[in-house]
Image (cartoon, rainbow, N blue to C red):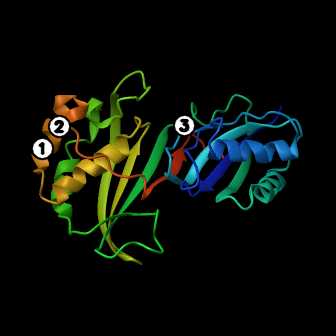
Amino acid sequence: MPRYALLVEYDGRPFAGWQRQADLPSVQGAIEDALARLEPRAHTIAAAGRTDTGVHARGQVAHCDMAKDWAPFRLSEALNHHLKPLPVAIRAVARVADDWHARFSAVERRYLFRLLMRRAPATLEAGQVWRVNHALDVDAMRAGAANLVGLHDFTTFRASLCQAKSPVKTLDEIRIEAVEGLAGPEVQFHLRARSFLHNQVRSIVGTLERVGAGAWAPEDVKHALDARDRAACGPVCPPDGLSLMGVGYPEDPFA
C-alpha cells in the first residue's frame, strides 16, 4: 500500500487533542474520517507528536497508507474538501517509503509559545495566545531558561501521567524574543528538541513566566530542575498560545 506523509495545520480549540478518542472530537479522528470518505474502510494514521487539548499546529506531520496510488496534490485537495468545515488543513502531501514513519523517523520537533502582555482581554487572538496583564522581564527569563538547555532529567517539568519511559531529554534550544504583535507586546518562546515530555513545554513556559514576573529568581529554575520533583515546578500555563511549528527529518519529505 502506498504511504503518504501529510503536513497538517489545525486550530486545536475544538478538539480534545490529536489522539483519536471514542466519544470526543480529535484531529486524528477528523483526518481518518476524511480518508474513509476517499477509501471506505478503517484508517489508522500516525503523527509526529500527540498535541493536547487546545494546542495548535502549523507543521504537524502524519502518515497514512492508501490502497490507491494517489497523486499527492489530488490527495491533499480531496482531504481538504472532506475536512470542511473543521479547522484542519492538509498543507502538503508527499509519497514516502513504505518504512517511513511520521513519529519514529523524526529527529526534531519545534514548538512556539506566544504570550501576550496586555490588560484588555484578547479578542481576535483569543485561543492563540496566553494573555497576562503584567509586564515581564525578558532578560530574567532568558537567564532562567539557560539552566534548562542541554541533557537533563526533566521530571520536574513533565506531567505526572507522562508515559515516556525516561524523563531524561536533551533540550537543544530555548529562544525567547520580545516582539510587537498585532494585539500588543508579546513574548515568544521557541523550543527545539528531538522529543518532548508530556506538558514539558507548558511547564517550562509557566515557570519562566514566574521568573519574568519577579516571583522567581533565574537561579530558582535550576533548583526546580535539580529537585526532580513535579511539586517544584511553577504553574503549568494554559494551552492557548502553544503551536507545533515543525518536525525535522533526515530528508524533508515535502522539499
Q: What element carries label 2?
A: helix
Camera-side mark, 3 or 2: 2
Camera-side mark, 1 or 3: 1
**Residue linked to disc 1:** 220
Is mark 3 in CB contact (under 8 Å) with mark 2?
Answer: no
Above/below status of 6 relative to 112: above
Q: Distance between the residues labelled 2 and 1?
A: 6 Å
Q: Quadrant of residue 135?
A: bottom left
**Residue linked to disc 3:** 106
User: Residue 61, position in %: x, y?
Assistant: 61, 45
User: Residue 196, position in %: x, y?
Assistant: 41, 37
In-front residue for pair 24/169: 24
At x 46%, y 70%, the residue is 125
User: Residue 56, position in %: x, y?
Assistant: 52, 54
* Tag shown at residue 236: none
Q: For mark 2, does the 10 Å Cα neighbourhood hold few (<14), some (14 to 19), or many (20 or more) residues?
A: many
**Residue linked to disc 2:** 224
At x 71%, y 46%, the residue is 31
Q: Is mark 3 on a helix, strand or loop?
A: loop
Above/below status of 163 relative to 55: above
Q: Given the image, on which type of amino acid does mark 2 rest?
A: Ala
Badge 3 or badge 2: first in the primary sequence: 3
Which quarter of the image is occupied by the N terminus? top right
Judge from the rendering whether residue 192 lies leftward or rightward of residue 53; answer left or right.
left
Above/below status of 197 relative to 121: above
User: Residue 85, position in %: x, y?
Assistant: 72, 62
Q: Distance between the residues labelled 3 and 2?
A: 30 Å
Q: In which quarter of the image is residue 212?
A: bottom left
Q: Given the image, on which type of amino acid does mark 1 rest?
A: Asp
Is mark 2 in CB contact (under 8 Å) with mark 1?
Answer: yes
Residue 146 visible? The answer is yes
